[in-house]
């Protein structure tokens, strides 16, 4: 065997044995539920204009009441942006023919709005996201539609008209069947992963449960944007966004208002977590009214929805502190030229959340929760994590007893690389600056890894020997050439 081949074989063997000595055996991934997802909520029209071919005279970015040109091609072109933030589900609103940019005046349950793109473009976009392990969810408005809706002329379908919108007779079984069949057909045709039923206020629970059952049979998660006793995959509570907003719009605020939400989630019922919604004022508006710095507020609020128990729903633009009152002001066209620091931070948080079943669904325990200072533990047989959210105006310290985490442990910060060991008082003392969030993993204390150091030293020696041999061989060849 030649020296080069011998060296490569030996070095590879050393590195392989070293990596095997520290590698953990991965558990088979359990089947995901909606409790494992994180949802990025966008409006197709307001995200990115991927092609001007489908723009018409209703598209005008200077008029917030008109269409802005965002389309399925735009979603496809920004797939890396969404993927890098780590969201596992993209909610894109209503995509049907509509008289309003946000899809709230649909005229069809079968046809795509031409300004958003074609059926082929939609299918291509969905498939591309799914290949990146990102699910696609659409809105399905079950009432309050345009008077020009394709079903409006069917006898007995319209029960009333209010504020220029038609309300279907949701007690009519024919109407119910039409709505269910339309939604299921749409999901099945395009292999969608989720549906958010909107305008459900006049629907009774029995009808909604039948609707949900058939959507689930088609393979789709089903949620709503209003409170309901129906069997949705995750519950929506109207006060959740306001509670999160009121807890994080400023420092030193009462964070115990979040505890009922946490208790509900821990009871086994997935609950949607958010600081605002597509239909509400922006969280940033509340923060600016408090005179606070929006990027810092956004960082803490997003981190809280991602790390506390719940199914996170984050509205597009939150990572650039988009502002505005409910409606067109809150639905600004996305500016991709803004600083990506917060988006990168979200991606790092999500990588931790997505990689750890424990961080998503592990046993939860409050260690501290008072006046904006939240410390909690997520634990399983495999892992233990400590999350510290210091939404206060002062540097804070928490002493976690050895009895809580165990002896001979290290508490390692995922962002600041801090290593915390047991102190002389028998505690793990974590100190965190004001308006900061940190995620700590509790691991066995690491001593000096002798085998690794020996192996690394051997590789260095071998590499040095290899370089010396090469130099000697080159010198010998030069001497031979000179002799000739």
Image (spheres, grey):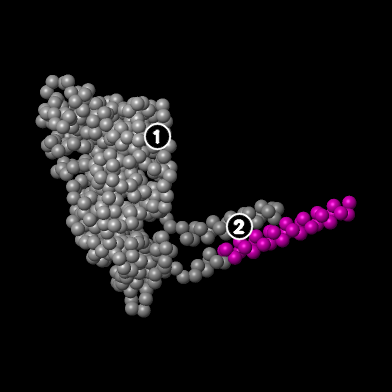
Is disc 1 placed on a helix, strand or loop? loop
Percent of width and height locating residue 273:
25, 50
Can you see residue 402? no
Q: Residues within 10 Å of mark 1 (few under 14, many from 20)?
A: many
Q: In this view, does 340 lie to the left or right of 180?
A: right
| Residue 71 image-quadrant placement | top left
Q: Which portion, as a residue range, is magenta?
A: 455-484
Secondary structure mainly formed by the magenta segment = helix
* Circle 1 residue: 49
Q: Identify the disc placed on residue 11.
A: 2
What residue appears at the point 17 percent right and 30 percent down from the top-left corner?
165
Please tell me which residue lies in front, 406 or 275: 275
Magenta span has 79? no
Circle on res. 354: none
Q: Which of 265 and 84 is in front in this view?
A: 84
Q: Residue furthest front?
A: 62
Q: Which residue is drawn at 24% across and 29% down?
A: 106
Looking at the image, residue 449 sits to the left or right of residue 9; the answer is left
Mark 2, other Cα within 10 Å: few <14 / some 14–19 / many ≥20: some
Earlier in the chain: of badge 2 and badge 1, it is 2
Q: Which residue is farthest bottom?
A: 424
Task: Determine if the magenta segment contains residue 478.
Answer: yes
Which callout, 2 or 1, points to the residue nearer the camera?
1
Image coordinates for residue 406, horizontal then vertical, percent: 33, 70
């Amino acid at each position: 065997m030649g020296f080069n081949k011998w060296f490569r074989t030996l070095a590879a063997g050393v590195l392989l044995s070293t990596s095997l000595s520290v590698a953990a055996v991965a558990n088979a991934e359990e089947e995901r539920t909606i409790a494992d997802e994180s949802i990025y909520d966008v409006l197709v029209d307001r995200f990115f204009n991927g092609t001007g071919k489908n723009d018409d005279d209703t598209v005008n970015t200077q008029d917030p009441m008109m269409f802005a040109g965002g389309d399925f091609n735009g979603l496809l072109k920004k797939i890396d942006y969404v993927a890098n933030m780590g969201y596992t589900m993209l909610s894109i609103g209503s995509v049907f023919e509509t008289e309003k940019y946000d899809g709230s005046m649909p005229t069809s349950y079968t046809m795509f709005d031409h300004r958003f793109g074609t059926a082929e473009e939609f299918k291509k976009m969905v498939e591309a996201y799914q290949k990146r392990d990102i699910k696609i969810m659409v809105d399905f408005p079950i009432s309050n539609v345009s008077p020009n809706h394709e079903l409006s002329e069917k006898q007995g379908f319209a029960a009333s008209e209010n504020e220029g919108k038609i309300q279907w007779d949701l007690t009519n079984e024919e109407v119910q069947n039409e709505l269910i069949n339309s939604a299921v057909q749409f999901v099945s045709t395009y292999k969608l992963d989720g549906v958010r039923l909107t305008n459900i206020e006049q629907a009774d629970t029995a009808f909604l449960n039948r609707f949900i059952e058939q959507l689930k049979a088609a393979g789709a998660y089903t949620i709503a944007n209003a409170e309901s006793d129906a069997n949705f995959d995750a519950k929506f509570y109207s006060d959740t966004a306001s509670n999160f907003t009121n807890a994080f719009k400023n420092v030193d605020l009462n964070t115990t208002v979040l505890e009922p939400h946490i208790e509900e989630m821990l009871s086994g019922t997935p609950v949607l977590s958010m600081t605002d919604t597509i239909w509400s004022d922006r969280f940033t508006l509340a923060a600016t009214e408090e005179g606070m710095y929006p990027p810092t507020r956004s960082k803490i609020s997003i981190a809280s929805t991602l790390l506390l128990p719940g199914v996170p729903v984050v509205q597009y633009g939150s990572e650039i502190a988009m502002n505005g009152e409910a409606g067109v002001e809150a639905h600004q066209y996305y500016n991709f030229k803004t600083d990506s620091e917060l988006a990168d931070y979200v991606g790092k948080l999500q990588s931790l959340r997505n990689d750890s079943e424990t961080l998503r669904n592990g046993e939860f325990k409050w260690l501290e929760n008072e006046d904006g200072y939240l410390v909690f533990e997520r634990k399983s047989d495999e892992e233990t994590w400590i999350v510290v959210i210091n939404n206060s105006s002062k540097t804070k310290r928490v002493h976690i007893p050895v009895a809580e985490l165990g002896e001979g442990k290290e508490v390692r910060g995922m962002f600041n690389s801090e290593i915390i060991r047991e102190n002389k008082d028998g505690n793990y003392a974590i100190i965190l600056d004001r308006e900061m969030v940190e995620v700590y993993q509790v691991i066995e204390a690491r001593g000096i890894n002798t085998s690794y150091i020996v192996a690394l030293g051997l590789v260095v020696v071998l590499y040095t020997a290899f370089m010396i041999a090469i130099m000697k061989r080159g010198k010998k060849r030069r001497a031979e050439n000179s002799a000739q």
